[in-house]
Amino acid sequence: MTDFKKIISHAKEYGFIFPSSEIYDGLSAVYDYAQNGVALKKNIRDYWWKSMVQLHHNIVGIDASILMHPTTWKASGHVDAFNDPLIDNKDSKKRYRADVLVEDYCAKIENKMDKEIAKAAKRFGEAFNPEEFKTTNPRVVGYQEKINTILKRLGQSLEKEDLEDVKNLIEELEIACPESGSRNWTEVKQFNLMFGTKLGASAESAMDLYLRPETAQGIFVNFLNVQKTGRMKIPFGIAQTGKAFRNEIVARQFIFRMREFEQMEMQFFVPPGTQKEWYDQWKQTRLSWHLSLGMGAENYRFHDHEKLAHYADAAADIEFKFPFGFKELEGIHSRTDFDLKSHEEFSGKKLQYFDPERNENYVPYVVETSIGLDRMFLAVFSWALRDETLEDGSTRTVLKLPEVLAPTKVAILPLVKKDGLPEVAQKLMDDLKWNHAVAYDEKDAVGRRYRRQDALGTPYCITIDHQTLEDQTVTIRDRDSMKQERIALDAVGGILNEKLDIKNWLQNI
Ligand code: ATP
């Protein structure tokens, strides 16, 4: 996997992601998607939407507003409990999330464990059984126990809001500030992550609002509207993609943690008592969705939560191996009936469903799947970016994006800018553009053009040469294998349709 700095600079240089308002030196943890980035982002969103909404007869979509009635956030618990524990280092004046400092400490122990395992794998060769080693090697077992004890204590202290103990833990572990190296910490304080804003023209009558910190509440408050107008029968789901805003304490990891980001969420409403089954099922369905993109099963793992949010009776993350280690990519939460019940209480309106099979009214339970679109972008982009040394010793940078997500699917390249080749290329482009995102490039030697498309992640290049004029054939070059094949000009459309058909990807789920 490529170095993180290189990922950020590649994203900028090739028109994927720019810092926001860069001419004013940018805005911390806010980014703009550029011409190629917006296409990749849209393709990821579509891939999610199709698998959720189009392929499930019992899931429908909505698009709720970012601004909502402020009582929403009282009812959801965000006004009182959407906090992160923050701690400052008095010497560097840097601010940290206290829980993240502890988790990073554990990640370092995990690194040591991985090194131990890698060493043993080398020593034992083929006979090595990593699972057995992890449970029997005293040093590795010790590391794992240490991690478990620390995380358990952190979870319990956060659950009880015992911030003093979080500080004690940081001190006991002798965690130092990564900037100053000092252990001169302030107390741990809670910090609310919601952005406030005002609605209304005059100061007296203005209403205090929040920018939504999650898209889910727009679904909860519309639950009955959708159920009634869509004549939905439980179990059913409501899906939504859209912006969310969080005033994150620390945001230093590019688009991993942003202050303005996009979520793709689905709330699945189920009869009380069946939530565990649905939770297990959605965990598997969502993991399969990720695996369908072919980015390697070894790069994903589940992390079951010790500390549960105020609304959940079970929660797990799907973690992905980012360049800085395994981190949360998606959350699957069993949210009980907390949200709907709370909205009933605060609004005085019933949010219940009459179940004809059970012959009773109830507030449904909810299992949600929630993934950050930008974080998914980073997962795909960082996994795909490679520097390769070729057989002849030269190097190339290639973005091996899953073809179905690539911003441009095919580049049409006339070998030279004359002899009627551009005209043939233009005609092919006009044929293909109805179904695919097509690029045209006639500048520079064809080898340089291939490299440019490699760096942009374009899976196929079609080259038009003099032979095309004689026998109506072209070459198709594959980004990953770099193999070129001669095919009939009129076969190009069919081949691309087959290779890029979303069905061939999603039906693996
Ligand atoms: P974290 O622990 O990383 O702060 P979270 O547990 O608060 O995340 P959720 O509230 O479960 O996150 O949000 C669901 C998903 O939204 C996350 O899995 C992540 O992909 C995405 N997400 C959350 N916060 C951000 C952010 N600041 N920037 C980008 N994506 C985010």
Image: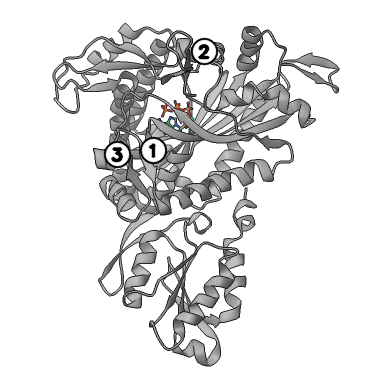
Number of labels in the image equals: 3
Q: Which of marks 3 and 2 is nearer the N terminus?
A: 2
Looking at numbered disc 3 in the image, what kind of residue is underneath it? Glu
- Which labelled disc corresponds to residue 133? 1
Residue 466, image quadrant: bottom left
Q: Nearer the viewer, mark 3 or mark 2?
A: 2
Q: Which residue does the image show at 47% across and 51% down from the upper left?
A: 40
Q: Position of residue 61 (x, y in %)?
A: 65, 36
Circle 2 residue: 77
Looking at numbered disc 2 in the image, what kind of residue is underneath it? Gly
The local crowd at label 1, few if under 14, some if 14 to 19, many if 20 or more residues have their Cα within 10 Å, is: some
Q: Which of marks 2 and 1 is in front?
A: 2
Disc 3, SS: helix
Q: Does mark 1's beta carbon lie closer than 8 Å to ligand 1?
A: no
Q: Which of marks 1 and 3 is nearer the N terminus?
A: 3
- Which labelled disc corresponds to residue 233? none
Looking at numbered disc 1 in the image, what kind of residue is underneath it? Phe
* Of 330 and 254, the residue lying toward us: 254
Q: Where is residue 300 in the image (x, y as percent from the top left)?
A: 46, 41
Say if 329 sits above or below 289 in the image.
above
**Is residue 277 left or right of 29 when viewed as pictured?**
right
Could one spot residue 234 in this view of the protein? Answer: no
Circle 3 residue: 116
Alpha-carbon span between mark 1 and mark 3:
10 Å
Could one spot residue 154 in this view of the protein? Answer: yes
**Is residue 30 left or right of 504 when viewed as pictured?**
left
